[in-house]
Amino acid sequence: MDVEKDKSTVPGEEYEVLKIHVRPDLYRAFRRCVWMTVHETGMSIVEIHNKMIEDLLKSREC
């Protein structure tokens, strides 16, 4: 899921690349979840990534 390949990002907005290391099963589940959300909501991959990180941080009260 490359930000460069996601043409639905907002031009002019800045993004940082977050690289994490996870088990292969978590990687596949994450990608599947993102793509399901893309098709269900029409949001961009970057929007979904940001929402997922925001939800994680809120749940951890960070």
Image: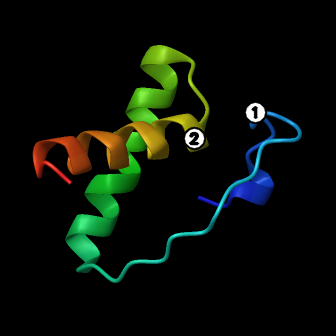
Q: Quadrant of residue 54?
A: top left
Give the residue type at disc 1: Ser
Residue lying at 40% horizontally and 36% vertically, measured from the top left? 51
Q: Quadrant of residue 4?
A: bottom right
Residue lying at 46% horizontally and 46% vertically, measured from the top left? 49
Q: Which residue is mark 2?
A: 45
Residue lying at 59% horizontally and 43% vertically, measured from the top left? 46
Q: Which residue is mark 1?
A: 8
Give the residue type at disc 2: Ile
Give the percent coordinates (x, y) of residue 35: 46, 39
Secondary structure of residue under mark 1 = loop
Q: Mark 1 and mark 2 in contact? Answer it, CB < 8 Å.
A: yes
How dense is the environment of label 1, judged by Cα within 10 Å: few (below 14), some, or many (20 and up)? some
**Camera-side residue of 22 and 56:** 56
Residue 49 is tagged as: none
Q: Residue furthest top?
A: 41
